[in-house]
Image (cartoon, rainbow, N blue to C red):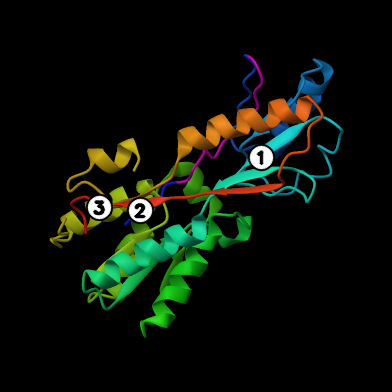
């Protein structure tokens, strides 16, 4: 059961026609900030998974982040990650699952998406289910490869009857490993619709997030007061995988 990340994991800094892609590299990200400042851009919309760049980018330049909190005075937009994790876990429980595992991203990144894992654990405990959490690392995130962890999970817990994957990439690989092992999966991003079976997923309002980020940065440039934290609603989209 996937829950896609609401933005690309690379850096997207843009206003007008400027787009910068750091390919996960912190140093390159900081260089882009210097370049954008040198080109006197009016503002920046940032989708970055680097959490330790706050000091390097301190400035009076208008800045809005997507799904990342870089400081108390920097506006941030996200989807409701906690509710998404709760809905996904509750959905599996309603389907009759008694042993549910979570395959999550790296907890060391301290991202807002970690709220999904917290919601999973809370919901499992509320329903008398022992949480099983498999955490992955940053290298796997970059390579998008989770096969070893999935194989180990199935081997260690052969009686698992439900899986909550924190991204569609992980969920697609779960389906592939399960198929190779002869395990049947009864069955919202583009990836979710391309797998067989199609993935039940948590739909995040990506277009709405993007439009609102642009609205916020324009208001910041105008000198208007904008909200520091904006959380947009999500919904569960049931397909064939659960």
Residue 229 in view of the camera: yes
Q: x%, y% of residue 48?
A: 63, 40
Is residue 208 shown above or below 135? above
How packed mark 3 is, by other alpha carbons closer than 10 Å (few <14, some 14-19, many 20 or more), is some
Q: x%, y% of residue 35?
A: 78, 21
Question: At numbered mark 1, what does the secondary structure look like: helix, strand or loop?
Answer: strand
The residue singled out by tag 3 in the image is 238
Q: As drawn, is 48 to the left or to the right of 105? A: right
Q: Main secondary structure of the magenta part?
A: loop
What residue is rendered at 13% in x and 61% in y?
A: 184
Q: CA distance from mark 3 to mark 1?
A: 30 Å
Q: As drawn, is 199 to the left or to the right of 90? A: left
What residue is rendered at 50% in x and 56% in y?
A: 81
Q: Which mark is residue 2?
A: 2
Closest to the observer, 53 or 140: 53
Whether 12 is among the magenta residues is yes
Question: At numbered mark 3, what does the secondary structure look like: helix, strand or loop?
Answer: loop
Closest to the observer, 51 or 231: 231
Residue 44 in view of the camera: no
Residue farthest front in this picture: 224
Please report the bounds of the magenta region as a residue range. Answer: 5-16
Quadrant occupied by the C terminus: bottom left
Q: x%, y% of residue 75?
A: 71, 42
Label 1 vs 2, first from the N-terminus: 2
Is residue 33 shown above or below 193? above
How packed mark 2 is, by other alpha carbons closer than 10 Å (few <14, some 14-19, many 20 or more), is many
Foreground mark, 1 or 2, reads 1
Q: x%, y% of residue 130?
A: 38, 82
**Do the residues bearing badges 2 and 3 touch, measured as CB atoms within 8 Å?**
no
Q: Which mark is residue 65?
A: 1
Closest to the observer, 32 or 93: 93
């Amino acid at each position: 059961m996937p829950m896609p990340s609401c933005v690309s994991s690379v850096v997207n800094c843009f206003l007008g026609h400027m787009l910068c892609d750091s390919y996960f590299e912190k140093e390159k990200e900081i260089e882009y900030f210097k370049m954008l400042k040198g080109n006197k851009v009016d503002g920046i919309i940032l989708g970055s998974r680097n959490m330790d760049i706050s000091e390097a980018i301190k400035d009076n330049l208008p800045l809005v982040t997507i799904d990342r909190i870089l400081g108390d005075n920097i506006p941030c937009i996200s989807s409701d990650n906690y509710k998404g994790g709760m809905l996904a876990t509750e959905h599996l429980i309603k389907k009759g699952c008694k042993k549910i595992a979570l395959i999550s991203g790296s907890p060391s990144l301290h991202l807002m998406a970690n709220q999904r894992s917290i919601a999973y654990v809370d919901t499992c405990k509320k329903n008398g289910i022992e949480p099983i959490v498999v955490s992955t690392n940053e290298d796997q995130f970059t390579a998008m490869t989770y096969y070893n962890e999935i194989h180990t999970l199935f081997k260690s817990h052969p009686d698992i009857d439900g899986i909550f994957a924190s991204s569609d990439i992980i969920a697609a690989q779960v389906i592939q490993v399960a198929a190779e092992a002869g395990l049947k999966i009864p069955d919202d991003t583009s990836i979710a619709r391309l797998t067989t079976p199609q993935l039940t997923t948590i739909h995040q309002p990506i277009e709405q997030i993007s439009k609102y980020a642009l609205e916020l940065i324009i208001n910041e440039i105008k000198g208007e007061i904008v909200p520091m934290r904006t959380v947009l609603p999500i919904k569960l989209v049931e397909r064939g995988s659960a």
